Image: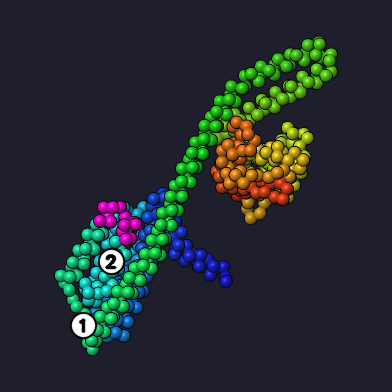
Amino acid sequence: MTPTANLVLSGVSGWLSGARAAENANGPADAIARQNMLQLIHLRWIAVAGQVVTILVVHFSFGFPLPLAAMMLVLLALVVLNLLSLLRLKRVEPLGRYELFAALAIDALALTIQLYFSGGATNPFTTLYLLHVILGAVLLEARATWAIVALISFFFVALIGFNRPIIAPGLSDRAFFELYIMGMLVGLLLDAVLLVTFVGRINTNLRSHDARLAELRQREAEEAHIIRMGLLASGAAHELGTPLATLDVILGDWRRVPAIASNAELAQELEDMRGEVRRCKAIVTGVLLSAGEARSGEVRVSTLRGFMDEVVAEWRASRADAPLLYETDLRDATPIIAESTLKQGIHNILDNALEASGSALRLSAATRDGWIRIVVEDDGPGFTSEALADFGKPYNSTKGRAGSGLGLFLLVNVLRKLGGVAEAENLVGGARVSIRLPVAMLEVARHG
């Protein structure tokens, strides 16, 4: 099949499933209303096709004289209404609260006119009124549903009051009755099939809407949690700055104490302590810079290869004995933003892998089709089934320490902002965490 044919079939499938009806939606509520309107449009196409076949068969095969011109004019009006409804879905204005009601009311009116021309209240297809009532109960508010019930009741009473019986010359009463029973059977089967099909689709739309709302609420809660953590981290960094500076000054003074300066072992331990204090100060500075980057607008530019080399070099520098195998084929010199939050997220993955394994770590980075993929593997015991099921959720950890399990949570949320994803899986004798994100989200031009 050609790419053009695939594209056409994909578009048709999208419209039939309702997936593309929400393209111009203004929020989740408007999206579900548009999808439901599309279901009514589909139902109307089926109604038009079915009525064309039924009218022609009844008129020419069964010998019932029907006003073909008038009935076909009603069907033409339904076709025009469908085309106008499709154009309405293309507009960005949200659907009004009464547009679905109006669509059902017009469909009921068209059915009433067709019934009037084909036997009135004695037409066996009056059972199709129930279809409108049930769809109204599913799609509309209670008040609008009762309005549909009242409207259909009025239409049926009007058919009784202005009854236009249909005469079939040459048919006996028994033959006419048998055709009537057959018509009732067909009408009931049509009601059942259409209700199962379209109410099922509408319920699917509603479930998708509920799932989307639940996802948005969960994301809002996670982002609020991250904001609180960021404020606490920034406040803690400010508070730690003074004692760390004091420690650095005191340790510098101790270097000049004769008892320490003359003892090589003490002098070396003192230098190690000063190195750890400097590392703590660097971490605090990084926290403060990360918190202030968005406000200052100052960003640090790198390349994909340079960024990944820097991530690995910094991690190795603080963990000199860590067995990390680093592989990459990155050659792209496109300027990108050196995202400190992404760097910290990769460090968290490496730290977790080091704790789980301690003997063999592998990190690879590659690009394909505009996406960068970063993979970290270890030879540890792997993730538990619970950890895999709750991957990326806060405090999801097997370390048993208070506050643990936030590293992957922060990484998943950082990637979400960048349009990427993180996935975890178990290997035979180890585990793998994969990061994928579009390179375009890191490019300087994108942020500029």
Q: Is residue 240 above or below residue 156?
A: above
In the rendered structure, which segment of residues is drawn in magenta?
Answer: 134-146
Tell me the amino acid under the disc marked 1: Ile
In the image, residue 258 sits, relative to residue 233, either above or below, namely above
In the displayed structure, does residue 436 sit left or right of residue 146? right
The image position of residue 191, as x and y in percent, is 34, 68
Give me the C-alpha separation between circle 1 and circle 2.
Answer: 23 Å
The residue at 67%/51% (across/down) is 367
Q: Which mark is residue 131?
A: none
Residue 189 appears anywhere in the view: yes
Q: Is residue 168 visible?
A: no
Q: Secondary structure at mark 1?
A: loop
Q: Residue furthest front?
A: 174
Pick the front one: 155 or 375: 155
Left/right of residue 263 with respect to residue 333 in the rendered view: right
In the orientation shown, which residue stands out farthest toward the top? 258
Q: What residue is pinned by disc 1?
A: 167
Which residue is labeled 2 in the image? Answer: 129
Residue contact at pointers 1 and 2, CB within 8 angstroms: no
Q: Is residue 241 magenta?
A: no
Residue in view at x 39 percent, y 64 percent: 196
Give residue 65's position: percent from left, percent from top: 24, 83
